[in-house]
Amino acid sequence: MSHRAICDIDQGSSHLNSLTPELLLETELSNLSSPKRLSLIGKRPILRRFPMPMLDLTLPRGALTLDMQRHLAAHLTHIAIRWEEWDIETFPERNDVAQGLTWVFFHEVEPHHIFTAGQPTQRPIYRLVTHFPQGAVNERTRAGYVRDVTQAILDAEGVPMDRENAQRVWSIIREIQEGSWGGAGQIVGLAQLASFIYGDPEQGHTFAEGRITALAPVVQ
């Protein structure tokens, strides 16, 4: 099985290459770990979502050429950011950062190792597993995301999105609980992620306060 990571293939690749875990840690996370940063939380909640999805697509080897995978990776990146409702119109200068934190992995499996109903599959089938930070998507946006990624995968294969073809694409969404996402050798919390995306600790911590509050159960 091959593991090929492709991030924002079509544009901004030189910028994305600089977004290494080490740079993320040294320039953002270490600066935000001080308790003094927590005092920057403002009074008004910023109820915008931020992206950091991670996508894993398992597919039969040979179903999509490398060029098809490159274009599909860019398309899936755009879809993930759009359905997380990242406000790129308000923060267009941070769009490259948002795309750099969206990773797509292609896992190619030999066709004779893929079975349906206990028999080798006759046509390519695809399994897309997407990890989102907790609270990044809701019931409405999950439905839209699943529809659009299914369409994108079938478009890459070059077939229409009819019922028969759509049934060959399964999409699984997993939300990673706050405090359970790690990067650059440490746990990365909601406030740290948002601060990196916005490029501003105050906005990031204000966002985190509003988002975590929104996720908390309502006490009657």
Image (cartoon, rainbow, N blue to C red):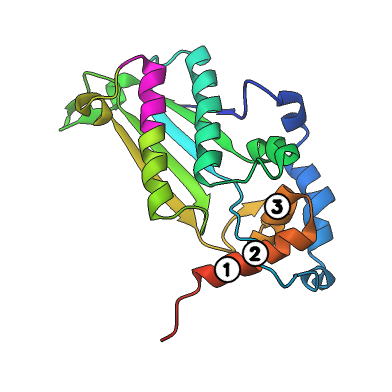
Closest to the observer, 156 or 57: 156
Secondary structure of the residue carrying numbered label 2: helix
Horizontal arrangement in the rendering, residue 20 relative to residue 76 (left or right): right
Name the residue: 39% across, 25% down. 153
Three-letter residue code for mark 2 = Ala
Residue 211, placed above or below residue 184:
below
**Residue 186 rendering spot, x and y as whole percentages:** 69, 57
* Dominant secondary-structure state across the stretch colored magenta: helix
Mark drawn on residue 185: 3
- What range is drawn magenta here? 149-159
**Residue 166 rendering spot, x and y as whole percentages:** 27, 29
Three-letter residue code for mark 1 = Ile
Give the mark count. 3
Q: Are marks 2 and 1 in contact (CB under 8 Å)?
A: yes
Residue 27, placed above or below residue 121:
below
Q: Are marks 3 and 1 in contact (CB under 8 Å)?
A: no
Secondary structure of the residue carrying numbered label 1: helix
Closest to the observer, 182 or 42: 42
